[in-house]
Amino acid sequence: MQFNPKQIPENKELKEYLSWRATCVTEAQRKNLVNKLGDQICMKTSFVTFIGMSEKPQKIEDGKAYFPSGTKIVYFTLTDKEGREFLPLFTGEEELLKWKQAAEKNPMKCLMTFDDLGPVFVTNAKFTGAVINPMSDNFIMPRDLIAGWMAKKRNVMQQAMATLAKRSRER
């Protein structure tokens, strides 16, 4: 995670894939799009979200924050009509600023990759999932989808490492 990032990526490719959702009418199209979204989200996207802290950082340098021992991160959440809580993730500054209720509280911005989500979901069982751009695209990723993508990514990475190790031994 990166706190108060100086630059927030635009994630144009992910935004484009999200815009395709309305045009997918067949099951094959939807499955193809979910695979593209999964690859983009798991491997190439950095999201921004708002967080609060139980303690102020002692210093922030180059996006790294140094906190007193015992500092707790508080994630801003969105709750649906059934009372389920979701971690909001935004593809860029423009999307983040659409969430006016959170922005009014002047919270800290946090840049997160897909790999950062694992520890967040393990330590926060209250989250039903995450939602990307809730004020526009509203792409919901339930916990089981996130867990499935994490397992798939782990397997792909392990296979890649095994292939590299095999090639190294063959030389």
Image: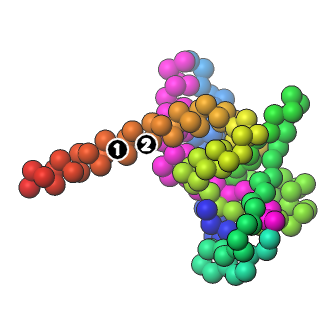
Q: Nearer the viewer, residue 49 or 95?
A: 49
Mark 1 in CB contact with mark 2 (< 8 angstroms): yes
- Magenta stretch, overall SS: helix
Residue pictured at 86% horizontal, 28% vertical: 82
* Residue 98 located within the stretch drawn in magenta: no
Residue 58, image quadrant: bottom right
Instruction: For label 2, count other residues whose C-alpha is less than 10 Å away and answer few (under 14), some (14-19) or many (20+).
Output: few
Q: Position of residue 11 (x, y in %)?
A: 59, 54
Q: Is residue 27 above or below residue 146?
A: above
Looking at the picture, which amino acid does disc 1 mark? Answer: Gln
**Which residues, given as a range, are shown in magenta?**
27-54
Query: Could you say which disc has been placed on residue 154 in the image?
Result: 2
Residue 137, image quadrant: top right
Q: Position of residue 102 (x, y in %)?
A: 86, 56
Image quarter (top left, top right, bottom left or bottom right) of the N terminus: bottom right
Residue pictured at 81% horizontal, 65% vertical: 54
Residue extending farthest left: 171
